[in-house]
Image (spheres, helix red, strand yellow):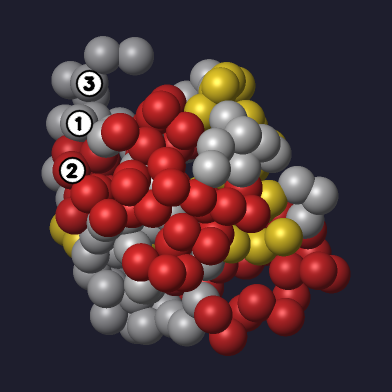
Amino acid sequence: MSRPLVLASTSRYRHELLARLDLEFIAAAPDFDERAEDPHFAELGADNFALRLARGKAASLRAAHPRGWLLGADQVAVLAPGELLHKPGTVEHAVDQLMRMSGRVLELVTGVVLLDAVTGATHEAVDRQALTLHAYDRAKAKAYVTRHRPLDCAGSFRIEDAGIKLFTHINNTNFTNIINLPLITIYNLLHTINLLPTNTPN
């Protein structure tokens, strides 16, 4: 790739996931306040809201990387029928959030935006996953949070650890989206616009 691919995130989870695609890329912290966008969730709905956040992250790097392909991705956790969840930050908030989720369906919606910093053109995709939770009690929720500390995760769980035990069913075609970044969606997007190295199998 003659122009750099720039991941608009310094999350170690996303960096590790994108590295699985064997692509050369750099990671940069977006200058974008996600929480300031919350008032737009109700009017846009989950898909368009996730894309709005992804666009904002990618666009915030355009000045610093004027020749880059800027990859922005943002996942929103939505508790049916439409409650937007945030990172809990504290053990108490995480337990409370898990209790609101008990026995219900959680949707993870990820917007992916690839911005051509030269032309301003964007290529976009949305990935959705539905997760059904067990009806568990507060003691189980607190035990999980106390041990695994998922305080930086919207929804207060990590599917990679014992958080998997909170669910009865996961309807997914793209497991890495649940972890944090939908690699199949990203790979297909890069392939569609011919941004994969010539030695990458397709």
Q: Residue at x 62, y 47 (%)?
A: 101
Q: Residue at x 81, y 69 (%)?
A: 42
Q: Position of residue 65 (x, y in %)?
A: 28, 73
Disc 2 and disc 1: Cα gap in Å?
7 Å
Classify residue 118 by image quadrant.
bottom left
User: Mark 3: which amino acid?
Assistant: Thr
Q: Nearer the viewer, residue 3 or 37?
A: 37
User: Mark 1: which amino acid?
Assistant: Arg
Q: Which mark is residue 54?
A: none
Q: Which residue is mark 1?
A: 20
Choose mark 3 or mark 2, whichever is in front: 2
Whether residue 184 is situated above or below residue 95 in the rendered picture:
above
Q: Are marks 2 and 1 in contact (CB under 8 Å)?
A: yes
Q: Which residue is mark 3?
A: 200
Q: Is residue 109 left or right of residue 199?
A: right
Q: Position of residue 135 (x, y in %)?
A: 61, 34
Q: Residue at x 41, y 28 (%)?
A: 165
**Farthest-out residue, top:** 201
